[in-house]
Image (cartoon, rainbow, N blue to C red):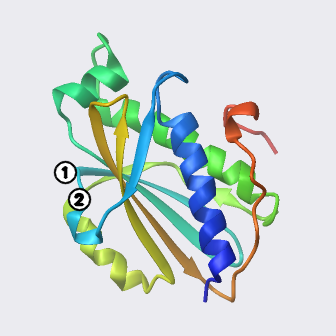
Amino acid sequence: MIGAQAKDSIERIFFSAVRTRLVTDAQHHCEISPRPAEAAQGAQVVVLTISSMQFRLLLLLHFEDDEATRRYYMGDTQGSLTESFMEFGNLCCGAMNQQLVEHFPDLGMSTPYALSSACLPYLRELKPDYVSTYALTLDGSVRLGATLCVCSQTSLDFVAAQTETANEGAGELELF
């Protein structure tokens, strides 16, 4: 079971990470709005995981390989949009991890991987304790989707600080 304070904290941490790490320029605006799960947008999904002894959080970022998204994340460079988008997703997940580690010191993050959005209905097979889906609009033109899915091994409740991740490290690789 995930308490109301934990759900609110996870959502605030997610919003902060999206607004500071999924944008390519700090000046770009990011709109976030709730969206029904069945209306998830994007043909492709990048999956990132944060795991602890108490829970597993999946961050699924939905995107289309369209001109607006390609231009936003790749500019004039050649290559794979999926790989470029995975880098931004990893920064976003890293920012979430940095805030969650204050409450759960045993966190680990997965390497991002890509799936088809046809896999989204199978999230219910994980028997999640919390799922929320959002529509994201970056810089007024790039449309993405996001799904947060949390599976808990035990009761989970905490209150995260009201801080912005923009003032912290950039989610770079930490060596142990």
Q: Is residue 156 left or right of residue 122?
A: right
Image quarter in which the N terminus is found:
bottom right
Q: Do the residues labelled 2 and 1 touch (CB within 8 Å)?
A: yes
Image quarter in which the C terminus is found:
top right
- Label 2 element class: helix
Tell me which corner region of the image, top left, top right, bottom left or bottom right, holds residue 132: bottom left
Q: Residues within 10 Å of mark 2 (few under 14, many from 20)?
A: some
Can you say whether 28 is above or below 98 in the image? above
Q: In this view, does 13 lie to the left or right of 69?
A: right
Q: Which residue is drawn at 63% across and 51% down?
A: 96
Horizontal and vertical percent position of residue 167: 75, 32
> Tag 1: residue type?
Ala
> Tag 2: residue type?
Ser
Q: Residue at x 57, y 35 (%)?
A: 20
Horizontal and vertical percent position of residue 36: 29, 69
- Label 1 element class: loop
Q: Which mark is residue 79?
A: none
Residue 169 makes an appearance in the image: no
Residue with the mark numbered 1: 43
Q: In this view, does 45 lie to the left or right of 168?
A: left
Can you say whether 108 is above or below 121 in the image? above
Considering depth in this image, is 87 or 21 the residue closer to the camera?
21
| Residue lying furthest top | 76
Horizontal and vertical percent position of residue 34: 38, 61
Residue with the mark numbered 2: 117
Considering depth in this image, is 125 or 136 the residue closer to the camera?
136
Q: Which residue is drawn at 46% across and 25% down?
A: 28
